[in-house]
Amino acid sequence: MKVGLLLNSINRLSQYLENFRKILIVNEIPYMILDPNSSSLLDDLKECTHLLFRHSQGDTDLKIYETISTIAHNTLGIKCMPDFQSFWPYEDKIKEYYLLKSHGFPIVESHVFWNIEHADAFLKETRFPIVAKLAKGAASSNVVIVKSIEEGQAINRQVFYKGVKAGGLNISSNLKSLRNAKLTKYGKAALRSVLINAGVIRDKSYFPEWQIQKDAILYQKYLPNNLFDQRVTVIGKRAFGLRRFVRKNDFRASGSRSEDADHRNIDTRCVEIAFSVSDKLNFSTMTYDFIYDENKKPFINEFGYCFMGSDIEVSPGYWDEKLNWHIVKNWPQYYQLVDFLQLQDLKAAVH
């Protein structure tokens, strides 16, 4: 056994992968660092039995891993984590919607459009408010509430004409609007955006390699009165729960970092649904965000295989598939390696 740890687009291991390395070292499991820029990459891959990677939200990481993992798995017979089933829908809300909807799982009602004519026609028939989403966006970026036909048409023009840069979908209802920010702060943000677009200053966003998003939009039913979402993460046969409260004067919970890890406050219907989806779709690891409809029925809002390690570490335990609660200190990378390497006696590293 030899595990390959693949460097990301900025040529380093993420902290999440570093924690994998700590466990490998403690258990004296051979590993090697794989550089995607190296001319010896394919020869190095051939020495490995397992391949580990961790995406950022950046487009370059997606391209790197899709290319290398396909060769590693299909040509060289290497076991990869994440596997294809887990990373295929990652950071793509449109893929997420189609995948769950096609299997009949409860995902918030949505409509996907690939041209402006159909998107504009939908706006003339729908009831407002609705939520507009682009396929990609971290910490609630590119997710806005739309309160009128005019706002929706403005969004459609952004998406289907020039396209939208990372975090750039912005209308009057977004967090950067005048109604949610002081005039001075808004003015500075607006000026900075103009200067970036003009090439006067550089965009120092967290993922500057994000490509422009264009020609696809998802309109989602707005479900009001959700003061939090419920995040359920499934790793193998274990589930972990977390409530994430919405931001002040907003409807979005992602990125708020206001959380409650008491498992007694988690709706176990969400846990049951999460286990069901992961089992049906063969996800080794997946995290699901749930919100309620008008009848307090839980629906999946979004999902993805990446999550902050602290989401699991703060949990006082986990549920098994029969919803029995186990009190234990958690470290997600440990559980993932136990399943991935099929080593039940794996030792956890101190961190």
Image (tube, grey):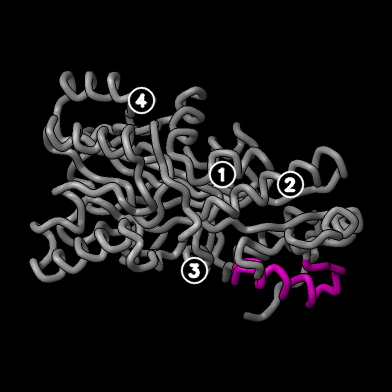
Is 28 within the magenta? yes
Q: Residue at x 42, y 45 (%)?
A: 212
The amino acid marked with disc number 1 is Lys
Q: Residue at x 62, y 47 (%)?
A: 63
Of the numbered discs 1 and 4, the one sitting upstream in the chain is: 4
3D distance between C-alphas at marks 1 and 2: 34 Å
Question: Which circle marks residue 62 in the picture?
Answer: none
The amino acid marked with disc number 2 is Ser
Please tell me whether residue 64 is drawn above or below residue 100 in the rendered image. Answer: below
3D distance between C-alphas at marks 4 and 3: 36 Å
Q: Nearer the viewer, residue 56 or 283?
A: 56
Q: Residues within 10 Å of mark 1 (few under 14, many from 20)?
A: few
Residue 314 position in % (x across, y down) = 47, 69
Residue 252 position in % (x across, y down) = 27, 52
3D distance between C-alphas at marks 3 and 2: 27 Å
What segment is highlighted magenta in the picture? 13-33
Q: Which residue is mark 2?
A: 69
Q: Which residue is mark 4?
A: 113
Q: Residue at x 37, y 44 (%)?
A: 290
Q: Which residue is mark 1?
A: 322
Is 54 within the magenta? no
3D distance between C-alphas at marks 1 and 4: 39 Å
Left or right, residue 335 beside residue 207: right
Q: Quadrant of the N terminus?
A: bottom right
